[in-house]
Image (cartoon, rainbow, N blue to C red):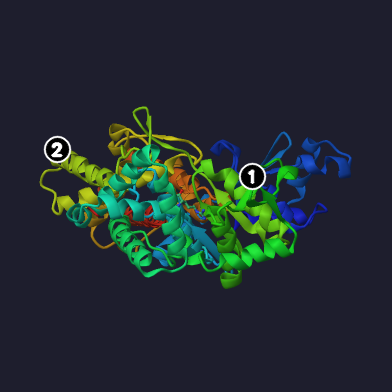
């Protein structure tokens, strides 16, 4: 039963506004004693020439109350208290029927949405900062698919640009082949840093680098071979991490993919009269929009990052005819994306309005900001390994006899890290703290996973749930609150998609776990004489498991049966 729809339908018979609009203004009251749904009457005061309180009173008298325990007014609000038994029965039946599909919908049917995430730079370390884009993007990708959209996950690899000329110069002079085989990214980073140190003393290295990149752009064999090797070695390392995280992409079309698609973009800009000469460089002026110019071609004729992003956006529109094109990239690149989107609009591509930059904060360890320049970064792989080790220590302490301890530690440890990244609004910085993150208490991944495992253990102890079941006996405050929370799953996912904010789903899962624990702490489940009550409660436990499982899996987190 969709209560909002029902309420909107009934109210529409008494006021002059269509059902869809009415449905949107129905609120969920902040406290249970204010009912389950509230209809604010302010809007109608002007047209009806009555005080909102009086309108609420009048509606209360006129409206049909079928399916509701009661309908009351509170000032300008009309508060609806649903028939608890109906809501509980209907919700639990739906969850138990739909199982792993519960929470999904056809909302996005027929709509292609590009989600670009992760997008690391080749030959650079995959560090803890990268988990932000990877986890947010992966969650959005999964949620969109779950709600019927056709999401296309794109890894826009940073695998093109003048830095590859530098890397080739460095390779030719300083590479240690053995080290390259053993620790490819470390070695590539070492020679890259060395290039920067050396070129300060000997600027002609920069010219050499430009020459090599030009040759790479022209498809010369030697440069292409080296570039390909750097890319393959790097990808192998990145894929290790994706494997650990269970993250997948539909496309790895990165910057190099657009190397032969930029000329037409430059031409289009030229033809539309948007290119201006600026000290030899070609730029699109954006001062009208209070932005610095978008550089398309440097003075030496080389295209850059922005040119590739323009080509990529146009390619995506032509290939996928996207409904939305989402870039999960750090907030420091906000200006870059504004410039790209504005330039696309100036080119006459109105679909630029369907492009979204989804920014996020920084990851901080103690007080140091993570940077890739000096090589003092924390590798994501190391962080995930440490999370696993630390979780194993905790399990050894709490539950030393657990089977598959390593497996559990991996899922819970990595899940804890991902959860921490997705817990707060994405614009907020994360300050890393192992103790907080791995704790079984508080708003953490392990807390939610432990709640799930505990619920599972109740179900194991109970065995098969009998068919004798009376949901009307679930009449305590805790039971109603839990079921009401379970009912709101789909809404939580849809809002997370709407705001492009996975934290809205994370918070929701925390609410489910909290509501379950409140119930669990005040009611017996297994030791009950009354079979029909016991089975009703067991079904509710099972439904809770389904929601936690589905929710966590949308965030890219696996559950464990025991921990
Ligand atoms: N490779 C870039 C970096 O590491 C991120 C790419 C963002 N995506 C884009 N379409 N520009 O900073």
Ligand 1 within 8 angstroms of badge 1 C-beta: no
* Secondary element at image label 1: loop
Instruction: Give the left or right position of residue 273, taking residue 498 as reference.
Output: right
One can see residue 494 in this view: no
Between residues 23 and 138, which one lies in front from this camera angle?
A: 138
Instruction: Give the left or right position of residue 332, taking residue 471 as reference.
Output: right
| Residue 39 image point, x, y percent | 69, 44
Q: Which residue is mark 1?
A: 27
| Residue 236 image point, x, y percent | 28, 60
| Residue positioned most to the left | 401
Quadrant of image for the N terminus: bottom right
Ligand 1 within 8 angstroms of badge 2 C-beta: no
Between residues 555 and 155, which one lies in front from this camera angle?
A: 155
What distance separates the C-alpha of mark 1 from that of mark 2?
Answer: 46 Å
**Residue in the picture at 46% in, 55% down:** 161
Q: Of label 1 and label 2, which has the lower sequence position?
A: 1
Task: Establish if 31 lies above or below 314.
Answer: above
**Residue in the picture at 67% in, 42% down:** 291
| Residue 553 image point, x, y percent | 37, 56
The image quarter containing residue 314 is bottom right
Tell me the tag on residue 186.
none
**Residue in the picture at 34% in, 40% down:** 198
Between residues 261 and 489, which one lies in front from this camera angle?
A: 261
* Secondary element at image label 2: helix
Tell me the tag on residue 397.
2
Q: Residues within 10 Å of mark 2 (few under 14, many from 20)?
A: few
Instruction: Give the left or right position of residue 347, taking residue 68 as reference.
Output: right
Q: Nearer the viewer, mark 1 or mark 2?
A: 2
One can see residue 252 in this view: yes
Between residues 71 and 278, which one lies in front from this camera angle?
A: 278
């Amino acid at each position: 039963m969709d209560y909002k729809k029902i309420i909107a339908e009934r109210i529409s018979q008494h006021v002059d506004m269509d059902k869809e609009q009415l449905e949107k203004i129905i609120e969920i009251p902040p406290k249970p004693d204010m009912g389950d749904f509230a209809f604010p009457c302010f809007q109608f005061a002007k047209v009806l020439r009555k005080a909102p309180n009086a309108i609420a009173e009048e509606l209360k008298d006129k409206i049909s109350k079928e399916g509701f325990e009661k309908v009351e007014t509170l000032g300008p609000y009309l508060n609806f208290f649903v028939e608890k038994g109906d809501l509980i029965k209907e919700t639990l039946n739906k969850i138990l029927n739909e199982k792993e599909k519960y929470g999904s919908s056809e909302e996005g049917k027929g709509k292609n949405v590009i989600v670009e995430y992760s997008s690391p730079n080749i030959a650079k370390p995959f560090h803890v900062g990268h988990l932000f884009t990877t986890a947010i993007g992966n969650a959005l990708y999964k949620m969109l698919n779950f709600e019927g959209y056709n999401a296309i996950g794109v890894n826009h690899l940073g695998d093109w640009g003048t830095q590859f000329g530098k890397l080739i110069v460095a390779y030719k002079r300083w590479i240690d082949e053995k080290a390259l085989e053993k620790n490819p990214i470390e070695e590539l980073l070492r020679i890259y840093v060395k290039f920067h140190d050396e070129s300060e003393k000997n600027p002609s290295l920069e010219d050499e680098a430009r020459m090599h990149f030009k040759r790479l752009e022209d498809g010369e064999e030697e440069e292409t071979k080296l570039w390909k090797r750097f890319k393959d070695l790097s990808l192998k390392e990145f894929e290790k991490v994706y494997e650990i995280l269970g993250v997948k992409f539909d496309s790895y079309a990165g910057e190099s993919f657009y190397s032969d698609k930029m000329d037409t973009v430059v031409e289009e800009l030229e033809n539309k009269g948007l290119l201006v000469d600026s000290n030899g460089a070609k730029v699109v002026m954006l001062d009208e929009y209070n932005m610095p110019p978008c550089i398309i071609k440097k003075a030496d004729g080389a295209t850059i990052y922005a040119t590739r992003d323009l080509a990529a956006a146009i390619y995506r529109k032509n290939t996928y005819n996207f409904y939305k094109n989402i870039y999960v990239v750090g907030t420091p690149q906000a200006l870059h994306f504004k410039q790209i989107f504005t330039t696309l609009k100036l080119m006459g591509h109105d679909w630029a309005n369907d492009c979204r930059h989804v920014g996020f904060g920084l990851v901080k360890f103690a007080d140091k900001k993570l940077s890739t320049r000096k090589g003092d970064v924390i590798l994501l792989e190391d962080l995930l390994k440490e999370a696993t080790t630390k979780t194993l220590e905790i399990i050894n302490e709490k539950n030393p006899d657990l089977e598959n301890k390593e497996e559990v530690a991996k899922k819970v440890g990595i899940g804890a890290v991902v959860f921490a990244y997705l817990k707060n609004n994405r614009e907020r910085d994360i300050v890393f703290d192992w103790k907080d993150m791995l704790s079984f208490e508080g708003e953490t991944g392990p807390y939610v996973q432990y709640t799930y495992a505990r619920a599972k253990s109740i179900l194991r102890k109970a065995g098969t749930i009998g068919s004798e079941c009376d949901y009307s006996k679930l009449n305590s405050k805790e039971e109603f609150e839990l079921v009401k929370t379970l009912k709101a799953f789909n809404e939580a996912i849809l809002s997370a998609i709407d705001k492009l904010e996975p934290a809205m789903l994370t918070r929701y899962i925390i609410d489910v776990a909290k509501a379950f624990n409140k119930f669990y702490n005040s009611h017996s489940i297994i030791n009950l004489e009354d079979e029909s009550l016991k089975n009703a409660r067991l079904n509710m436990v099972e439904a809770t498991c389904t929601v936690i499982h589905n929710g966590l899996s949308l965030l890219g987190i696996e559950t464990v049966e025991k921990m």
